Each structure stands twice: as C-alpha cells, then as structure tokens.
Image: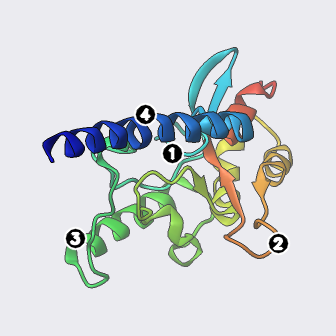
Amino acid sequence: MMLIALRMTVLSVLALGIAYPLAVTGVARLAFPQASEGSLITSRGEPVGSALIGQRFEADRYFHSRPSAAGSGYDAMASAASNRAPTSRQLIDDVTDRVDAIVQSETGVSRGDVPVDLVTASGSGLDPDISPDSAMLQVERVARTRGLDPDVVRALVRQHTTERQFGFLGERRVNVLRLNLALDALPSD
C-alpha cells in the first residue's frame, strides 16, 4: 500500500509539478512571446519597465500616473488596494489633497475638471494606464515644461491612446510609460 502511494506521489510531482508547467510555459512563449516575458518596454536597448505595471513619474516634464496603494508605490510585491470605504476619512483626505495638488499644478483646471483616475488608486495599485481625459488635462504643463507646442503633445496623447478591445471591452486608455518615452524621443528646445 505504501509503495502505491509513493509511486502516485512521484507520478503526480512529475506530471503536475514539472511536465505541465513546462508545457504551459512552452506554449505561452510560442503563442505570446512578449507577454510571456513580462511585456517589457525597452529604451535604447535597455529594459525600462513593463507595459503591465505602472511607475511613478513626478517631474513636471512627464505625464503623471495614477496614484498607487501598493507598498511605497507600484511595488508588485505589495499589490493591493487600500480597501478604504467611500466614507473613509483617510480616503476623502487623500483624494482632496490630490485634487488640490492637481488644481495647483495644472493651468486652468478647476476641482470639477479632475478625472477620478488621477486621484484614486486602482484595485491592484499597479495600473500602468490613465484615461485619455487624464492625459489631456496634463498636456499644458508637460508642453510648457518641455518648451513644446501643446498641439504636438495632444497629438502624441491621441497617438498613444488605446481604444477599447473589440470596440466594447474595457475603457480607452493611455499607457503612461510608453507616452513618456515617446515624449523623451521628441526634439525639444
């Protein structure tokens, strides 16, 4: 009886612990090579991030990402939401502070103009995307800081806007890392 249990354990480990993961990894690498490698984005041949994980951009010359509730910010090891209720005093204070900061830093923006995704963290705290409205709200600041024509920056935002999948799934979005890398590739004054 013990020998049967031992054989079944060894067979299960070989099939489910080695053969199955190797087969799934092989299929993923063949069918989805970039995604299976982490959807890495490179600049000048060096990896600078993933298209799937947000990064913090604080300089005025860059588009700013969504706030992150993951660890000290965009920490994939601490991916989580804040789990604060809409009535949480801490959440209300955080959102109010973020709205105030955006109204101060963005030209001609009032409190009611600030898109919700610029002041609230996503469920994972790692969202790499912002809405097109959030990107457009930041155009004037980025253009002014870089000495660029705002129309050039707006066109870049439109160029980097991803439409809904199949025309109805998800939301329109702009990947902040890709947009900021495209900005860095533009000639500026």
The residue pinned by badge 1 equals 54
Asked if the residue at tag 3 contacts the one at tag 1, i.e. Cβ–Cβ closer than 8 Å, the answer is no
Q: From the top left corner, tell me how far across and down residue 175 is, in percent.
A: 65, 48
* Residue beneath disc 3: 90
- Could you say whether the residue bearing mark 4 is in a helix, strand or loop? helix
Q: Are marks 1 and 2 in contact (CB under 8 Å)?
A: no
Position of 115 with respect to 183 (left or right) is left
73 in relation to 183, above or below: below
Distance of label 2 from label 4 (alpha carbons): 39 Å
Secondary structure, mark 2, is loop
Q: Secondary structure at mark 3?
A: helix
Crowd class of label 3 (few under 14; some 14 to 19; many from 20; radius 10 Å): few
Q: Earlier in the sequence, mark 2 or mark 4?
A: 4
- Quarter the C terminus occupies: top right
* Residue 122 visible in the picture: yes
Residue neighbourhood size for the residue with mark 2, other residues' Cα within 10 Å, grouped as few (<14), some (14–19), many (≥20): few
Residue 145 can be seen, yes or no = no
